[in-house]
Image: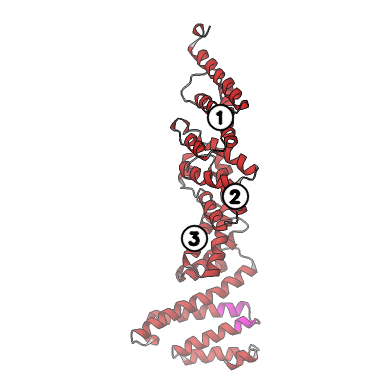
Amino acid sequence: AMSNVSVANKEFEELRLHYRVAWAAYRSAEINQVVTSGKKLLQPGVNLGSAVEYSNITTDAIELIGNALFENNDYNFTMKTLEDRSLNRYGAAIAYQTLNRYSANEIHSEVLKVGPKVLKKFPLAKELPEIVQIVAQSYDVSGRTHNKVETMRLLANLLPKNSLWRAHNDDDFEAISNMEDKAKTANILVASYFYEQGLNTGNTHHFATASSHYNNLLSYSANDPSANTWRLRTAHCNYFSGDLAAADKGYSDLIEAYKSDEKTIQVAAYQLVLTREKAWRESFAKVVNAGDEPKKDPITVASVARLENAIDGYAARYPNQSRAVDLMLVGASSNRDMERYDRASKYWQKVLVSKPSAAQRTI
């Protein structure tokens, strides 16, 4: 009789009874009973002798409830079950089981009804990376690219060392490692998407978003084979966003501080000239609008000197390129506008001996 066994064994026998009831209810499609018995299997605080067996029962209970919710396919009942406080510890795991079944059966409309609510309710759950991927895939299949990317941002933002998710799960090495692999891929996707959106629309917010995700990647994996590509794109984002000081540093570092390939150095050197030209023009316009003379303004004079330095650096590296001639023409015109005619003349002379095109000769 149950009354004759120890408390621990009695609790375990009761647990096994609920386990058998849950399975029987599942086979009979008695969904309410599956959930009721499953909830009893997942209650904390039970003193059991066999941790391994209890772990197996817990795993089965999660799968039973998750599968039952899928097969019942009742949105309101599903959400009521997932929001049950007594299941809070296992809610995300149950939701993952249900969503995974929907996804495997290509029932994407149900994924998109349940999934976003699950992501909001369980932002620190160990299963979050997998749930994000399921929801994002359903958005992708449904042709909702922007929603897919915004969902992937949830995963991408788990990567930083100070993320709340990482702190919450810091004792689970396997979960952290799994997240990092998925979050790195998510950051690459999100950064690339917003970078392209920025190029297509000119929206500085897109560039700022892309830059933040490239910075996530660089903080996590500074020596990655793609790291200099991320650095270059970050500098581009700063340039197009108008943060010229940050862009200047980014391009300069790629030329001088990192082991960049020649293609990257050439792009960075060219963009450095454009960045410094833009900075000089802004300074020049500010002084002129104030009614002063740019050639007497120390900031503007220093700005054009930095521009010259970038032009000379590019021309020295790539003396036979048409672009080098274009940039020397920039040096000539900027010095002309500054009424530094001796400097302008030196650039024009360099242009004439650099085999300029007919169009370049007419400038």
Q: Earlier in the sequence, mark 3 or mark 2?
A: 2
Where residue 38 appears, x then y in whole percent? 53, 26
Quadrant of the rendered image containing residue 94: top right
Q: Indicate which label's residue lies in the foreground, 3 or 1.
A: 1
Task: Please tell me which residue is depicted at 63% across the width and 88% down the height of the picture.
Answer: 354
Q: Residue tagged by mark 2?
A: 138
Q: Which mark is residue 209?
A: 3
User: In the rendered image, is residue 45 in sight?
Assistant: yes
Kindly identify the amino acid type of the residue bearing the numbered disc 3: Thr
Q: Are marks 2 and 1 in contact (CB under 8 Å)?
A: no
* Label 2 packing within 10 angstroms: few (<14), some (14-19), many (20+): many
Task: Please tell me which residue is depicted at 48% across the width and 63% down the height of the picture.
Answer: 208
Q: Earlier in the sequence, mark 2 or mark 1?
A: 1
Q: Vertically, is 79 above or below 5?
A: below
Give, as a single range, the part of the protein colored magenta: 312-324
Q: Which mark is residue 31?
A: 1
Alpha carbons under labels 2 and 1: distance apart? 26 Å
Kindly identify the amino acid type of the residue bearing the numbered disc 1: Ile
